[in-house]
Image: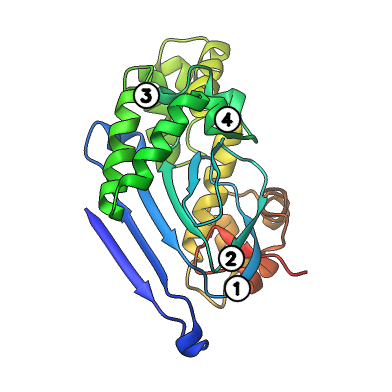
Amino acid sequence: MESAREIVDPGQGEAALPVFSQYYIPEKPLSEFVGLFWYWRGHHVPYSKERVLPMGTAELVISLGRGTSGAGISGPQSKSVIIQRTSHDELLGIHFNPGGAFPFLGFPFGNLRGLHISLSDLWGEGSTAQLLCLLHEATTVEMKFRVLEKWLMWIACRPLKHHPAVSFAIREFQRDPGLLSSAAVAEKANLSQRRFIQLFRDEVGLTPKLFCRVLRFRNVIGRIQGLRDVDWVDIALSSGYFDQSHFNHDFREFSGLTPTGYLELRTEHPSHVLVRE
């Protein structure tokens, strides 16, 4: 499945740089680990700073724009991070599913928590240079997606599968982040709780408890997408928070903002909010 869109900001007239985005969802088995490949060019304003909210997943980003270079991967975050965007951006990326980067790393995924490292540090300068060369030689976005897809299959250093206990836990936590504790999952998997927590952290990057907290926060962001007036008490209770205070604490911890502050600053991407200077 592929999709593309091109938008010219009517507020900028003919001088505006077009914003173009495209994405590609791979087939199995890669789709179990990769949510989508994405491409983004341009920006609605010449420059902005944005706060990216934690989603509990990893993101690989490659800059393709003229006069720019850079390629790196961000591990699973539990805090928001600040990025800069410009109208000259040309970015190619991989949005991994929860735990999705694990087969492509030669070390426990938990070691990447809260970090951003270059692809050269991850895969070596020679391999990364080869990948960037292939991407620049690809003349269409679709071809670049295919290059990334083949590259991931080639670079995988583990089988494209999780430990059964981790797969079960991800499914159950996504269905309801507050339904099962790590002790309950460990019992169902016939593992000690300590062993299960270590397995989960190694493959998903966060402990089960923190992953569920981030997932619940992410679900809230999804539920209020497009809404202008939000009943925060109802959102908090129906999302599994004990009370409004518990909800506000987690929201501020993960986003650095109050819930109403988020509504004022959110962008076209629900997980991005503007940073006012």
Q: Marks 4 and 2, how far apart in space?
A: 31 Å
Residue beneath label 1, please? Answer: 46
x and y, in percent, of residue 195 in the image: 53, 11
Residue beneath label 4, please? Answer: 206
Q: Marks 3 and 1, how far apart in space?
A: 36 Å
Answer yes or no: is residue 101 visible: no
Indicate the quadrant where residue 148 lies.
Answer: top left
Q: Amino acid at mark 3?
A: Ile
Q: Amino acid at mark 4?
A: Leu
- 118 vs 180, left or right, is right
Indicate the quadrant where residue 189 lies.
Answer: top left
Residue depicted at x 52% and y 87%: 12
Q: Amino acid at mark 2?
A: Thr
Up the image or down, 164 lies above or below 204; here it is above
Circle number at residue 229: none
Q: Marks 2 and 3, how far apart in space?
A: 31 Å
The tag earlier along the polypeptide, 3 or 4, is 3
